[in-house]
Amino acid sequence: MTTVPHPPRPPLFIGVDGGGTGCRARLEDADGRLLGAGSAGAAAVRLGIDRSLAEVEAASRAAAVDAGMSPSVLAEVDAGVGLAGIGRRGVVNEIYARSHPFRSVIYVNDATIACIGAHGGRDGGIVIVGTGSAGFAIVRGREIKVGGYGFPISDEGSGADLGLRALRQTLRAYDGRIKPTRLTAEILERFDDDPFTVVAWMDRATATDYATLAPMVMRHANAGDKIARRIVRTGASRVDDMVRHLVDNGAPRMALAGGLASSMEPWLAADVRRRLSPVEGDGVAGGILLARRQRPSVIRRIG
C-alpha cells in the first residue's frame, strides 16, 4: 500500500509582545488571517529570563489553542517576539541560547515591534508610554533609541514614573511640607494612612506596582488636582523631548503607543501633537511583520 505524504502546512506566523504588565500573542496564516490570540503574565526581562520566556510560550500556546490547534503546532510557526528590557548587556545572547517551541524565532526589544507595527513596516518613530517608556525609530535601516534604560533610572513619563512621583509627593504632604490634595489623600488612604506601610510596600514593589497608581494620577490631573497636574506635566514634557529628538534625527512620522498613550497625548506640547500619526498596528502586528521578513527558507530550531 502506497502512503500518500501529507502536503506541508501553509506558513504560520505568531507575534508576541512581552511587556512589564502582560504578554500578548496572535497567530496568523500566510494571508494575514487571524487564527487565534492568547495572553499571559508580565514578560519583561527584568523579571528574569526564565520567567520572561515562560510567559512568551504560555501566551503562544494559548493563541494556538484559541485557533483550535494543538500547542505542538508552534513547531511549525515562525515567531517575532518583542521583550521589554532585552537590550540589557548579555541578555540577547543568553535568550538565544535557550530552547524555544517555534520553527524559528527572532527576539527584539518591544519598542522595535511597536515601531514596526505602528507604521506598517515603514520608516518612522514611536514613543511607548506604558508601564515604562522609551523612544525608538527606524530611519533608512538605521535604528535610533532614546531612553528605555529601566525604572527608576529612566522611563520618564511612564506609568511607573508617575506612580513614583505621586508617592513622593504624598509623603511630603504627610510631613506637612506641602499642602495635601485629593490625590495625596487617596494614595495615603490606600496605605491605611500610614507612611511606614508605604515604606514596607516599597521594599517589594516593582515598576508594574508603581504603574498601578498612574490611572489615579491621570484622573486627578484631569480633575484639576494641583499636584497631579504638576506630575503629569513633568511626565509629558519628557515624552515631548523624546518625540522631538527622534524627529530631529530624521523620523518622517511619529506615533504614541502603550497603555498611557491616549491619556498622555492631550498633555503634550502643541508642536509634538501635530507630529503624531495614528497607530496602524500594535506591537503584536509588528512582531508578525518581523517574523514574515525573517522567515528562513529551511527549518531551524534551537533545542
Image (tube, rainbow, N blue to C red):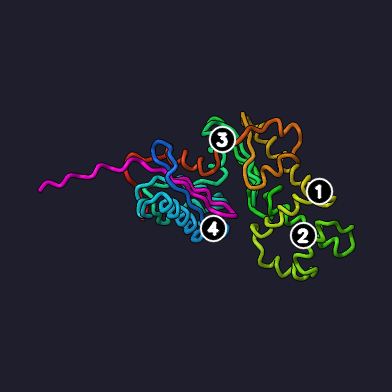
Question: Residue 122 at x, y = what percent?
Answer: 53, 31
Quickly name the residue at label 3: 280
Q: Quick check: is 17 in the magenta stretch?
A: yes
Query: Real-space Cα distance between discs 2 and 3?
Result: 35 Å
Query: Real-space Cα distance between discs 4 and 1?
Result: 32 Å
Quarter of image, res 172:
bottom right
Q: Earlier in the sequence, mark 3 or mark 1?
A: 1
**Do the numbered discs 2 and 1 sit on residues whose CB atoms are within 8 Å?**
no
Classify mark 1: helix, strand or loop: loop
Q: Earlier in the sequence, mark 2 or mark 1?
A: 2
Query: Real-space Cα distance between discs 2 and 1?
Result: 19 Å
Classify mark 3: helix, strand or loop: loop
Q: Quick check: is 297 in the magenta stretch?
A: no
> What span is in magenta?
1-27
Query: Real-space Cα distance between discs 3 and 1?
Result: 31 Å
Q: Badge 1: few (under 14), some or many (20 or more) residues near its Cα, within 10 Å?
A: few
Query: Real-space Cα distance between discs 4 and 3?
Result: 25 Å
Residue 223, disc: 1
x 71%, y 52%: residue? 215
Classify mark 4: helix, strand or loop: loop
Query: Real-space Cα distance between discs 4 and 2?
Result: 25 Å
Classify mark 2: helix, strand or loop: helix
Q: Badge 4: few (under 14), some or many (20 or more) residues near its Cα, within 10 Å?
A: some
Q: Amino acid at mark 4?
A: Gly
Quickly name the residue at label 4: 41
Q: Earlier in the sequence, mark 2 or mark 3?
A: 2
- Judge left or right: residue 91 versus residue 133: left
Question: Residue 255 at x, y = what percent?
Answer: 63, 36
Quickly name the residue at label 2: 167
Q: Amino acid at mark 3?
A: Glu
Q: Earlier in the sequence, mark 4 or mark 1?
A: 4
Q: Amino acid at mark 1?
A: Ala
